[in-house]
Image (spheres, rainbow, N blue to C red):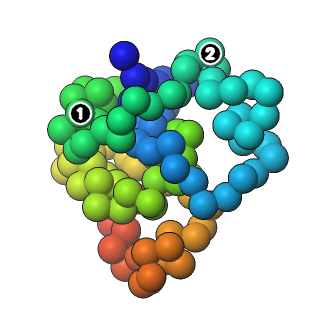
């Protein structure tokens, strides 16, 4: 079973893609550590859809924040990111996005207005 959501402290992290635009030396994906973060295996056998991600979250208010940060760049799945972030916000949860900052470049448009109010 793949790990879509994983808690660390009082935050819930979401692993929505294994694709990335960079090869950062500090990323566990690119080190001898392999696909693990805090002993969670983040290998994805498929990229989860909105419904799967929402089911993995449960109640977003159980956490200080829900963080889009897994083994890939969340903005590569912008439509999914926005749908899930909207769902979290509608239920009173806080959302954070950890990104490489290239979302506008890879999506070929300024995505910041689309994320306003969601993250």
Tell which circle, 2 or 1, labels the residue nearer the N-terminal end: 2
Residue of label 2:
39
98 w.r.t. 93: above or below: below
Packing grade of label 2 (10 A; few <14, some 14-19, many >=20) is few
Packing grade of label 1 (10 A; few <14, some 14-19, many >=20) is few
The image shows residue 88 at horizontal and vertical percentages of 27, 45
Residue at 55% across, 20% down: 41
Q: Is residue 14 left or right of residue 30?
A: left
Residue at 42% across, 84% down: 109
The image shows residue 113 at horizontal and vertical percentages of 37, 79
Residue at 60% across, 67% down: 101
The image shows residue 39 at horizontal and vertical percentages of 62, 15
Q: Secondary structure at mark 2?
A: loop
Residue of label 1:
52
Q: Is residue 26 left or right of residue 48?
A: right
Quarter of the rendering containing residue 49? top left
93 w.r.t. 21: above or below: above
CA separation in Å, label 2 and label 1: 22 Å
Inspect this view and state whether residue 9 appears.
Answer: no
Q: Nearer the viewer, residue 80 or 112?
A: 80
């Amino acid at each position: 079973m793949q790990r879509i959501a994983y808690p660390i402290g009082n935050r819930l992290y979401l692993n929505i893609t294994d694709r990335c635009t960079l090869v950062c030396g500090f990323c566990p994906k690119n080190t001898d550590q392999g696909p693990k973060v805090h002993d969670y295996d983040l290998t994805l056998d498929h990229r989860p859809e909105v419904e799967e991600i929402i089911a993995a979250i449960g109640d977003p208010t159980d956490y200080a924040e829900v963080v889009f940060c897994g083994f890939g760049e969340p903005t590569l799945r912008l439509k999914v990111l926005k749908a899930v972030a909207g769902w979290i916000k509608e239920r009173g949860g806080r959302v954070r996005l950890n990104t490489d900052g290239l979302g506008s470049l890879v999506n070929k448009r300024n995505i910041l207005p689309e994320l306003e109010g969601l993250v």
